Amino acid sequence: MSSGHRLRDQQRPLLEEERKQEEEKEEEGGEEGSSESDARTLWFIPDCCGVVCASFTWLLVLFANFVVTFVLLLPSKSFFHAVLHGVSFNSVAGLALASHLRTMLTDPGAVPRGNATRQHMASLQLKPGQVVSKCSKCCSIKPHRAHHCSICQRCIRRMDHHCPWVNNCVGEKNQRFFVLFTMYISIMSGHALALCGYHFISCIRVQWTECSDFSPPVTILLMIFLCMESLLFLTFTAVMFSTQLHSICNYNTGSRGDVGGRWAGLRSVFGGPPSLLWISPFAGLKLPSFPRKRPRRGGAEFSV
Ligand SMILES: [Zn+2]
Ligand SMILES: [Zn+2]
């Protein structure tokens, strides 16, 4: 603070009492013990509502798989039709669930908690008069475009929103998996709707027993549920997918017609030049390890 740096709080300037507390914290061990962020540690938000919603999402996907496989495809007379659609539908469902897991279990870009210390400020080597933001809730220095999430109780870099369906924030590091999740769910929903329509039309002129292994009321109920679920999710995820892509493409560009800027936005989220890895939820997968003692961090982590 002595060199003229100003720390801008959300509501108020840094008070003298807080400075003293920070100094005490630093004496007790500094930043080494204060940060919980470790890229290799498993990230999971213990939020009841989120866990219920995320589990419900899995149940709905598994329900759709069951109806498509056992009601729509297995009774089919055409082996080729059943195998082609069975393999493609279940593959996309697998990719959707993998994307869901990656979105839920990936650190969305959490800022280390409680890092607004004098020691850390000094390491930033700020110019005199330069202003940085401090989050009053998690006591961290907020990088540009980071926002605090009250459910994750952390500041998240490039936070888009907190999604209970994936029980996590959508931010800098997991946005690509969220985009893939919405894309695969919308493909699945469209595919399920098409299969329902085809099954209905092909069954309307033949005996019921040739068309389904289940009784007529059960088959009709399962198909109605599947159609409603698919319509709802197709609408929801297609809108989400297009708004996510729109915000990514226009993230760094002031002008909307800047094609180079759009590609730059996509590359920054999906990583590297366009390739099949962009649509793989397994890209960059590293198995998490148990938390261990962190090595001392050197240099400035934030570009403020
Ligand atoms: Zn915060
Ligand atoms: Zn959150």
Image (cartoon, rainbow, N blue to C red):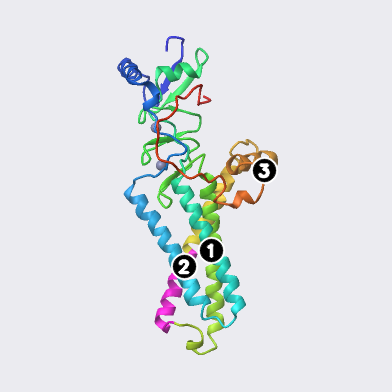
Where is mark 2, residue-wise?
A: 64
Residue at disc 2, CB closer than 8 Å to ligand 2: no
| Residue located 53% across and 85% down the image | 204
Residue 190 on the magenta span: no
Which region is colored magenta?
214-231
Query: Which secondary structure, mark 1?
Result: helix
- Counting from the top left corner in percent of width and height, residue 70 is at 47, 75
Where is mark 1, residue-wise?
A: 188
Q: Earlier in the sequence, mark 3 or mark 1?
A: 1
Q: Type of residue at label 2?
A: Ala
Where is mark 3, residue-wise?
A: 273
Looking at the image, can residue 256 be seen? no
| Residue located 48% across and 29% down the image | 143
Do the residues bearing badges 1 and 2 touch, measured as CB atoms within 8 Å?
yes
Residue 227 on the magenta span: yes
What secondary structure is the stretch in magenta mostly built from? helix
Do the residues bearing badges 3 and 2 touch, measured as CB atoms within 8 Å?
no
Q: Earlier in the sequence, mark 1 or mark 2?
A: 2
C-alpha distance separating marks 3 and 1:
27 Å
Mark 1 burial class by Cα count in 10 Å: few <14, some 14-19, many 20+: many
Ligand 1, by image quadrant, is top left
